[in-house]
Every structure is written in structure tokens, then in C-alpha cells.
Image (spheres, rainbow, N blue to C red):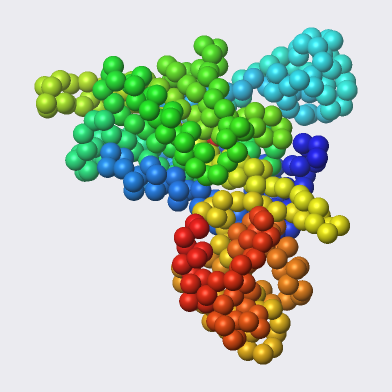
Amino acid sequence: MADTQLMDKLVSLCKRRGFVFQSSEIYGGLGSVWDYGPLGVELKKNVKDRWWRAMVHARDDIEGLDAAILMHARVWEASGHVAGFTDPLVDCRHCKNRFRADDPRIKGTPGQPDAQCPVCGSRGTLTEPRLFNLMFKTFMGPVEEQAAVVYLRPETAQGIYVNYLNVLQSSRQRIPFGIAQIGKAFRNEITPGNFIFRTREFEQMEMQFFVQPGTDAEWFERWREWRMQWHRDLGLTPARLQWHQHGPDELAHYARAAFDIQYQFPFGWQEIEGIHNRGDFDLGRHQEYSGKKLEYFDQAANQRYLPYIVETSAGADRVTLTLLVDAYREEEVEGETRVVLGFHPAVAPIKAGVFPLVKKDGMPELATELYHDLKRRFPVFYDDSGAIGRRYRRMDEAGTPFGITVDGETLQARTVTVRHRDSMQQERVGLDRVADFVAERL
Ligand code: GAP
């Protein structure tokens, strides 16, 4: 299957099955903003829950935080985003379209007579590149003036830095320790696209680990290893994960070292998470701009210092897309195409489908009872419409790992048929064992 075809099929499956919808679709849609439907919200929630469990609940040295999206405007001056979070853009004076200056479709040099607009084809109409800030700006309070400007945060990290002392003091942590947060971020991306890969509103799962200067390189390596393992544990194909080290000209203004975890998407190897050694850039800048001391006093060593920060920054939407791409497959079964999302059971939105084989002989009653019993432990789906084969196929497309059918034998032997999504093999399991059978495989 051609790669572009795969993305088209995935987008269409996501809509058909209720994973992801275009935002404001009935009004013609809003560019690169997406809504998660009933299955998508479960899938993404599973990603976020696994991240939170691994980063916060399973560790003694990381605390959670949920900072507000709106922050003091000075935060973004200190962070460098007001001055430096920009893309160079060119406008076409003829058709009014706007492009990134490095858009490969542009022929010639923007600003020069030979440059050609990739949309209308006019020559000499492209302006010189101008810097365009990617932050969304709005106003706080009733007056729309410069003093009232606030930004929608372009990353969640700054909410952590400005709360670092609050968390340190209230949690009684000592360095080394981390603060983790999941939340929305907004970027007025100029070339968004590839479905939910690059959007203007997205969710980040970020963790900032505060360490003693001099120990940062060691922590950086540990965090690289742990984060890669987390992605592998999602059940992603290992050969489709790789490291990309940032060269000197790629490094963000705050980073001393940076590695991306990349996934091989149909549109190429792309970043899903960044691990950054930020040194003391962030706390140093906030200390300077706020005038508040942000140093840490290490009692044991009787030493005062500004901690260095190792950051792990993943996109919840990108990881969700990675799971969808990795899971999608088509198979020929008895002359028909079977579409399957082969999610690891732990991330699958629905864990099991429950079906009465026919709508008579007490099967719907028994299946309903089983459904309610299972529903107390995990998301399950009840379906009694259409042929059993069709019901299995619908669950295959939703990525549901188990199909549980109440049939004639159930009434006599108190066993059900469990059909496995990937192998399509069936086995009989005792009615009173079904819940544990599923739970053991999550
Ligand atoms: N605090 C550091 C930071 O924000 P980043 O590399 O700009 O670093 C981190 O972003 C992660 O956030 C990326 O690896 C990606 O998963 C996600 N991300 C960034 N921009 C995004 C966008 N426009 N749409 C979806 N996810 C995005």
C-alpha cells in the first residue's frame, strides 16, 4: 500500500469508527484542529494514563502538576518565546497566500523577481522572508491593549519552571527530583498537517527533572533510555523507532543537548518526543525576569546552586497517531479485506465486545448480564445486530482485542467463545473466568 494511501485510509477509518473528527466540520472545518470521538478519547486517555503512571505514580522522585494555560506575559519574554519562537514567512502579493520561507515548493529566492508562488504561479510576487511568531495572542479583561496581552502557552514546560519552588517546598522533595504535567499547548503552525501529527492545538506530556549541575549528562542518558523503553512498551514496532541527535544548528535556544525519539510514519521519520538538557537556562531567565531567587540550598553539601534541567517532552496526539499507524493493517480473509487495528490490549479503547449469537433462547439476557459484569472492570461494547462475522469485523476496526460470544453451549456448559482479534482463533472460557481472562491479558 502506498504511504499516502495509508494515511488517507487511516483518516477515513478514524472518522468512520469515531476516533478523530475534523473540528467544526459542519462549518467547513477549522484548519489543523481535530476533535477526538468516543474511541479516540479512550485511546489518547490510555496513552496519558500510562505516561502518568510511569512518570508520577511509579516513582518517588517526581510530582504531578496542572498549571493554567494562561500565564503572565513576562513568562514568555523570559522563556525566549516572544523574541525567538518564530518562523520566517513569505507572502504572495498576488494571491495573498503565506508560506514558510523554506517551503520546498517555492522556486527561486523569495523577494527576487525569479521567485515563483507555488499556489498561483505568479513570478516576482513573493515578499522577502519576515519573522512570524507562532504564539496565539489574546487579551485579558475588557480592554484590548498591549498591557492586556496574554498568550496561549506554546509548551507546558514554563508552568513547571515558575512553580518549581512551590512544588519543592510543599512536597519536601530534594534534588534530584522532577515535576510532570499533561496539558494543552497551542502553536499557530504555518505548515501544519499529516492529520493529528502537527496541529495548532495539541496536548503535551512533559517532565522537567531538576539536578545538580555536573550530574546533568548522567541523568540525560538515563532519561533517554527510560523514555525509549516507554515507547517500546506501548507495543510499537521496535524497528520503527530511532534516535535523532540535534546538530549544533538544530538545537533550540535553551538546549545544551537534544535527542528526538523518532517514529517511521508513512510520511517519513518524524519526532514524537524530545529529550533535552536545558542546563540552567530556564531557571536563570525566570530568576532574572521575576527578580525572585530560584536557587536551591543543598543542606548536606552546604551548597547553593541553580539546578540544571533535563526535560522529556512528548506529544499525546503524536503518540496516539503513532499507535494508530503502527496498528493499522489490511488482510485478505476468505476473499474479503479485513481491516484491523492491532493495538496492544493495554491501550485498546475497548477491551472486549460481548455478543449474543442469536437474539433468542436466553442468549441476550445472559450476554447482557456478562456485559454489565465486565463493564465494571473495563470498557466493553455490547452488540447484537447483524451476523456474528460482521460484529467481529466492526470490533477488528475498533482495535478490540477480544470478542466474547454467548452461544448455545453457554446455556448448557456455562462457557463462552472468546475470539482473538489478531489470530481470529477461538477458544472456550468458563463464564465465571471471562473477566479474569481479559484482565490478565491487559
Ligand atoms: N518544552 C519543549 C518542547 O515543547 P518541542 O520539540 O517543541 O519541545 C515537544 O515539542 C513535543 O510536543 C514534540 O515532540 C511533539 O510530540 C509535540 N508537539 C510539538 N508541536 C506540536 C504540534 N504542532 N502538534 C502536535 N504535537 C506537537
Looking at the picture, tell me which residue is in the foreground, 171 or 70.
171
In the image, taking residue 292 as reference, residue 278 lies left or right, namely right
In the image, taking residue 64 as reference, residue 320 lies left or right, namely right
Looking at the picture, tell me which residue is in the foreground, 44 or 184.
44
Looking at the picture, tell me which residue is in the foreground, 170 or 440.
440
Q: Residue at x 34, y 38 (%)?
A: 179
Query: Quarter of the image containing the N terminus?
Result: top right
Q: Write down the quadrant of residue 38 in the picture.
A: bottom right
In the image, taking residue 360 as reference, residue 255 lies left or right, namely left
- Which percent across, then down, holds residue 203? 52, 43
Q: Residue at x 51, y 71 (%)?
A: 434
Please, is residue 151 above or below residue 247 in the view?
A: below
Is residue 365 at all visible to an observer of this figure? no
Q: How many marks?
A: 0
- Which percent across, then down, holds residue 382? 62, 73
- Which percent across, then down, holds residue 131? 61, 20
- Which percent across, then down, holds residue 279? 36, 20
Is residue 3 at all visible to an observer of this figure? yes
Kindly give the residue lying farthest to the bottom in the view shown. Answer: 361
In the image, taking residue 315 as reference, residue 294 lies left or right, namely left
Q: Residue at x 29, y 20 (%)?
A: 215
Please, is residue 196 above or below residue 347 in the view?
A: above
Q: Write down the quadrant of residue 79 in the picture.
A: top left
